[in-house]
Amino acid sequence: MSQKTKDNIFKIVQTFLKSPPLVVWGSRATVSFGLPSMWDLNQALKKEIEDFDISNDNLEGELGKDKYQGKLSQIKQIIWKEVNNADFSVSRETMSGMRLVLGCSPLSLRCLQCSS
């Protein structure tokens, strides 16, 4: 593949990923690119959310509990901040971000957007 083709593909990918960072939730596909793991996100939430269950070892299960419904905006903000901070360093590696997107099945992608 020519460098020009790679550059064009990368520009297209950048356009789609400009706003909120893309999270391939629970797939571990993003960890190798320097984005936070579920454990990292769990630790960040434990620091920021009052009454967050610090003994949990399953973030997806924990966030599904009713007691967090009133805190979802704050939770999304914390997760977005953690992923976005890591995403800046990932985006510096030109082709890594493209491989991340092209290597994943669209059915496994879920976008996490900050609602505020």
Image: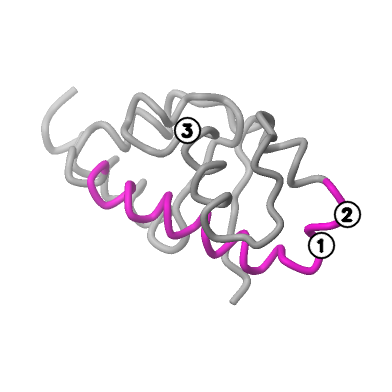
In which quadrant of the rendered view does residue 34 lie? top left
Residue sitting at 57 percent across and 25 percent down? Answer: 27
Which numbered circle lies on residue 37? 3
Instruction: Give the Cα separation between the discs numbered 2 and 1.
Output: 5 Å
Residue sitting at 62 percent across and 60 percent down? Answer: 49
Q: Which residues are magenta?
A: 65-90
Residue annotated with mark 1? 69
Residue type indicated by callout 3: Ser
* Relative side of 68 to 90, left or right: right
Name the residue at the left extreme.
3
Q: Secondary structure at mark 3?
A: loop
Residue type indicated by callout 2: Asp
Residue type indicated by callout 1: Gln
Instruction: Give the Cα separation between the discs numbered 3 and 1.
Output: 23 Å
Residue 69 drawn in magenta: yes
Q: Residues within 10 Å of mark 2 (few under 14, many from 20)?
A: few
Q: Earlier in the sequence, mark 2 or mark 3?
A: 3
Q: Earlier in the sequence, mark 3 or mark 1?
A: 3
Where's residue 107, x and y in %?
67, 31
Residue annotated with mark 2? 66
Considering the image in quadrants, where does the N terminus appear?
top left
* Relative side of 73 to 29, left or right: right
Residue sitting at 71 percent across and 45 percent down? Answer: 53
Main SS of the magenta part reads: helix
Where's residue 45, x and y in %?
56, 52
Instruction: Give the Cα separation between the discs numbered 2 and 3.
Output: 23 Å
Between residue 4 and residue 83, name the one nearer to us. 83
Where's residue 60, x and y in %?
71, 37
Which numbered circle lies on residue 3? none
Q: How many marks?
A: 3
Name the residue at the bottom extreme.
116
Q: Residues within 10 Å of mark 3 (few under 14, many from 20)?
A: some
